[in-house]
Amino acid sequence: MIPEKVMSSLAVKTNSKIVLLIMDGVGGLPLNGKTELETARKPNLDKLAQGSIGGLTDPINPGITPGSGPSHLAIFGYDPLKIDIGRGVLEAAGIGFELTGRDLAARGNFATMNDDQVISDRRAGRIPTAKNEQICAELQAKIKKIDDVEVFIRPGKEHRFVIIFRGDGLQGPLTDADPQKEGLKIKFTEAPAPESKKASDIVNKFIKEANIILKNHHPANTVLLRGIAKVPQIPSMTELFKLTPACIATYPMYKGLASLVGMKILPVGDTIASEFQTLKEQWDNYDFFYVHIKKTDSYGEDGNFENKVHIIEELDACLPQLLELKPAVIAVTSDHSTPAIMKGHSWHPNPFILHSQWERKDSLKAFTENECAHGIIGRFPACDAMQLMLANALKLNKFGA
Amino acid sequence: MIPEKVMSSLAVKTNSKIVLLIMDGVGGLPLNGKTELETARKPNLDKLAQGSIGGLTDPINPGITPGSGPSHLAIFGYDPLKIDIGRGVLEAAGIGFELTGRDLAARGNFATMNDDQVISDRRAGRIPTAKNEQICAELQAKIKKIDDVEVFIRPGKEHRFVIIFRGDGLQGPLTDADPQKEGLKIKFTEAPAPESKKASDIVNKFIKEANIILKNHHPANTVLLRGIAKVPQIPSMTELFKLTPACIATYPMYKGLASLVGMKILPVGDTIASEFQTLKEQWDNYDFFYVHIKKTDSYGEDGNFENKVHIIEELDACLPQLLELKPAVIAVTSDHSTPAIMKGHSWHPNPFILHSQWERKDSLKAFTENECAHGIIGRFPACDAMQLMLANALKLNKFGA
């Protein structure tokens, strides 16, 4: 990818529209000789592929399995190795908590310690979510502020929670307040630099207060905090690419990621059809649409090959709604692969197709991993995809004279 | 490739085993329409390729012909443009001299100078190796130490030798003590920084003493020293990749290179069969095996197309011994190409196949340059291959959340 400064000097505002359709985790591996994409009946996607150019993207680097944060940053046109999104920020995004520039966010675990403050269970026996909610409510009621810093505590699932510290002069990142292993004493966070001293003091005061409040909540009698950091300073897609971007996603995590790069989060229902309905309704208001399909990944994570195939087919049936809008550029890809047979994210590169009137003809027969592997784009870093989308929407000036 | 710090944070120790089989210089060019790999009858390699994914690697960068040092570093997962192995260190590795952290090594030439100390022949008329050995023995007998620094002199072939200075406070690299051209005066080495002053003084004292001792050894009456440097500080494969790696190679140079990255050098006979025998015997003790086949390169360098083909066939016949061990990952490639018709290393990318249960199906028919060129990995930097091997052995955690 080219440097940000060069990119922002080349990008121009135009009326042409780009749709980036992310089928989360759609890249797969064969079961009975065929991948999920090879198994699904998807005439519309295959027809689109026949008029597109194809390639395979590496979200981070060959062989590297990405989390959703870095893999989305890459496909949004950012270098995922340079932008470090703290775990706390990602979790806050995941529950839809809107972070400001004054916020320090951390991912929390309720945990169990003994009388000597030695951790015996880093997950407090995976307490039920209802219990978690109750403890979070109690902590929040008793700790609203520490010194001049506001505190927001939000429950997650089982033993997980998110905590946000909001105030002036809070610098991150801090070291984890987590011994990482059971059998070790609880740990306080440390300021790696003098300017993060205030932040570490506040966080450690919280841990001490929490330990007092939680005294009688065994097994959830202490907290571990990780990934304590501020929202990274990322130039928005408007600054970098001169886009007016919008996000159409059903899950909070992806809305959170999109908001980090300055996308407007559009209201949407729960289904793929409703996502395309939103796209149609908002068509005139934006020039870049990120449309996120979640369930390909969810079923991949569950190891449910068949349902992953069904979601691909459901998407395919809705695709004409998108095609009718005649975007200048349609890119279809996944952020990372989630092969059902691996029940998790994997390192395999993502099938990628790009449809535009300005591309050389490819010979793709279908939207599958192996067809894309032989496409004319070749194998390329996912973070370069944005450049291709912008170019094909005629949104990039010439570099040099 | 990803930064070392990220890599070492992702790598995990597991029991799965990786075999990296390097057929040195196996990539070739056609004679009578077929390359060495296309000419050889190699049913086992071809069958392995049919169950593998394929690609082409560039050891350094497209168009760049590598030496064995950088090309091996790349395939071991290191950035060959960032790690500078001095010529002296490489030559010391090549003769199996075990270097320590206190050593400064240099590659030497015996050369001819006239009474005005002007070089008339940089190779001393390519004196016979026996003569070289005799002169080295005399130099070594007369120069065992310079000040507090030990000196080790080891003959190579014809006019070449290696010299190692062992002592405290020897900093490299130094400039070459070599005018590079005939017709110029002999040159002393210089210290590019104050902390290498001691080293340059010692090296120059050696040159002066050698000139006195060699006075009557015309044409070998002086020495030229190049690539004067210490062993580079390379993180070991254990630090970087959490591997317990072993080297199975018959030639000292490759054992030396492997030891630079922390591999255990295993005892082995002279033949390919004996290399695979060692592999079998040591199977339980390591999780990464680098197996090096030398003679494909040697015959390439000799321009002996036919014998290069025979070595490929000999390797193929032994391959079942490797396959029986059922490694989680087998990668077969060359470090660089050595087309017999070019009689030397070349810039052509290397055929690469990777066999693992976790890869997408490819459509390779055989292990050849052109089949690999159409493989689904595509063309990629050799230094990324290690990430693919580790990923396929399930030895890498997810990057980011």
Image (cartoon, coloured by chain):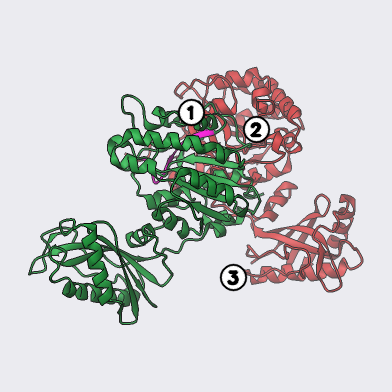
Chain colours: A red, B green
Q: What stretch of residues is rendered in magenta?
A: B53-63
Tell me the SS state at disc 3.
Answer: loop
| Residue position marked by numbered label 3 in the rendering | A193
Q: Nearer the viewer, residue A376 or B363?
A: B363
Residue under the point 79% across and 54% down: A160
What kind of residue is marked 2? Answer: Gly
Q: Is residue A262 visible?
A: no
From the image, tell me which residue sits under label 2: A28
In the drawing, does residue B351 fall left or right of residue A266? Answer: left
CA separation in Å, label 1 and label 3 = 57 Å
Mark-to-mark CA distance, 2 and 3: 43 Å
- The location of residue A339, given as percent across then percent down, is 67, 35
Disc 1 is placed on an element classified as loop
Front residue of this view, candidates B326 and A166? B326
Q: Nearer the viewer, mark 2 or mark 1?
A: 1
Alpha-carbon distance for marks 2 and 1?
25 Å
The answer to which of marks 2 and 3 sits earlier in the sequence is 2
Chain letter belonging to callout 3:
A
